[in-house]
Image: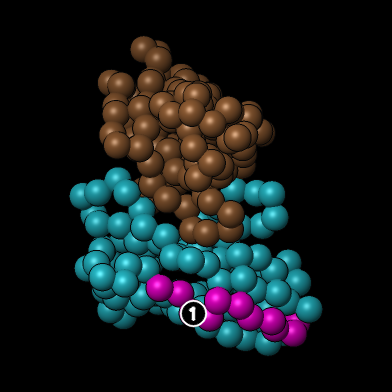
Chain colours: A cyan, B brown
Amino acid sequence: NAGVTQTPKFQVLKTGQSMTLQCAQDMNHEYMSWYRQDPGMGLRLIHYSVGAGITDQGEVPNGYNVSRSTTEDFPLRLLSAAPSQTSVYFCASRAGASYEQYFGPGTRLTVT
Amino acid sequence: DAKTTQPTSMDCAEGRAANLPCNHSTISGNEYVYWYRQIHSQGPQYIIHGLKNNETNEMASLIITEDRKSSTLILPHATLRDTAVYYCIVRVGGNQFYFGTGTSLTVIP
């Protein structure tokens, strides 16, 4: 099992550009989530999904879109990048009956 | 109103027990407390969770007070590889977990 994978590892965007952060898991987990982590801060939930076709907003959803067409994939779209979205983005998954979240290695995004 | 409160940083001598406290006075009666750690800038790693009984696994022990308003994560014999940020986490509804800012633990040789 590869676990949770994220691409790219690093990305630099200019203000106003759009992009998609990819997240995939091969553990057949129902739940998937996107978090952002700013310097010196804990993780804050952006969006999450409880299964294919079902998504919901977390604590800081503005400026981001998600969709879940398959169990394995949960991409995060930045519609029009802003410097305030400079952060490290983590994707996580867990089985529905489990309390343990598995995190990906993160994507470091810089918006100039 | 913070969901969890943890010390910003702690030191521990290598080989000694590391005791990391957490206050979660607003936790609901049926909600678990979870502990994760983050080494360098890697993705967080699950350690342990508990409801009201003390729990132990191969990584750590979790002591929860009887009133469930606080808990302590115990690493029985800290090693240099345990240097990390430790997060005490509660669920705040549905699939939403509150991470807070965590405790930066430094294990000293």
Instruction: Report the quarter where the C terminus of chain A lies.
Output: bottom right
In the image, A85 versus B36, the foreground residue is B36
- Kindly report the secondary structure that dominates the magenta region of the rendered protein: strand
In the image, A10 versus A67, the foreground residue is A10
Q: Is residue B4 visible?
A: yes
Residues drawn in magenta: A5-15
Rate crowding at label 1 as few (under 14), some (14 to 19) or many (20 or more) other CA atoms within 10 Å.
Answer: some
Q: Chain of mark 1?
A: A
Q: Is residue A76 magenta?
A: no
Count of marks, rendered view: 1
Tell me the residue at 54%/41% (across/down). B80
Tell me the residue at 38%/20% (across/down). B64
Q: Which residue is the site of mark 1?
A: A7
Residue B15: give x, y in percent of width and height. Answer: 48, 28
Where A82 sits versus B78, above or below?
A: below
Where B43 sits versus B5, above or below?
A: below
In the image, A13 versus B21, the foreground residue is B21
Mark 1 is on which residue type? Thr
Tell me the residue at 58%/85% (across/down). A19
Q: Is residue A6 magenta?
A: yes
Q: Secondary structure at mark 1?
A: strand
Instruction: Report the quarter where the N terminus of chain A lies.
Output: bottom left
Residue B48: give x, y in percent of width and height. Answer: 35, 37
- Residue B61 falls in image quadrant: top left
Where B96 sits versus A106, above or below?
A: above
